Image (spheres, rainbow, N blue to C red):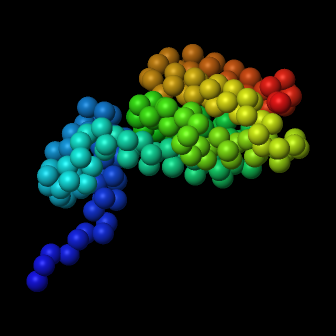
Amino acid sequence: MPPHADSQLEERILKAAQRLWKVHGPASLTLRAVAREAGTTTPTVYKRFGNKQALHKALAERVRSQLNEQLFASKSLEEVCRRYLAFVQQNPHEYRLLLHAWSDVFHPELPRPGRAWLMQQFANRFGGDAEDYALVAYALIMLSHGAATVLSIPGDEIARKELEENFLKIADRLIAHNEVLAD
């Protein structure tokens, strides 16, 4: 009887990789460690992902999807900013993983569901077409990313609080006065 393919193998590998990355950061993400954590072999991980970079890319896509899921549940544009920071503070290692795949967020030929969703939220709230809000969406994404990048690094709690408070004030004003960047 031939062996049956494990339909959940790729998911197990990605979950294992995410657990290792979340707890120990990038140094822990070796294909051998991932294989051991997933209950499989190193050659099997290589067969599914090819190399460590491909595993990083798949893991970054998974984390971006989880972040988008959190953001898409927001009831307001202001809540999006707060959820973004909360995700980063709860998942600092995973957020830093996204830094390696930043071009996927900005590449015009790749799907950008977060950007499209954000632009549509502006249009829903302020009227007009979603495309009218491309610049303000980019501004909010870049502002959020800048604050999140700093907050994903351990540091002085007083400075972190100051950064978070000012980010939220600036983001709220940008949302309220989006017309300065709307087309």
In the picture, measured across the screen, residue 165 lies left or right of residue 103, that is: right
Residue 83 appears anywhere in the view: no
Q: Quadrant of the N terminus?
A: bottom left
Residue 166, above or below 43: above
Residue 55, above or below 152: below
In the picture, measured across the screen, residue 111 lies left or right of residue 155, that is: right
Q: Residue furthest bottom?
A: 1
What's the residue at 33%, 34% (across, down)?
Answer: 25
Specify the quadrant of the image occupied by residue 139.
top right
Residue 4, above or below 135: below
Q: Residue furthest front?
A: 109
**In the depicted view, which residue is nearer to us: 61 or 132?**
132
What's the residue at 31%, 43% (across, down)?
Answer: 54
Q: Position of residue 17 (x, y in %)?
A: 30, 47
**In the depicted view, which residue is nearer to us: 71 or 120?**
120
What's the residue at 20%, 75% (across, down)?
Answer: 4
- Number of labels in the image equals 0
What's the residue at 59%, 43% (across, down)?
Answer: 112
Q: Residue furthest left?
A: 1
Residue 28, above or below 42: above
Q: Position of residue 172 (x, y in %)?
A: 77, 30
Q: Quadrant of the C terminus?
A: top right
In the picture, measured across the screen, residue 9 lies left or right of residue 142, that is: left
In the picture, measured across the screen, residue 171 lies left or right of residue 13, that is: right
Q: Position of residue 160 (x, y in %)?
A: 56, 21
Q: Position of residue 94 (x, y in %)?
A: 42, 38
Residue 63 appears anywhere in the view: yes
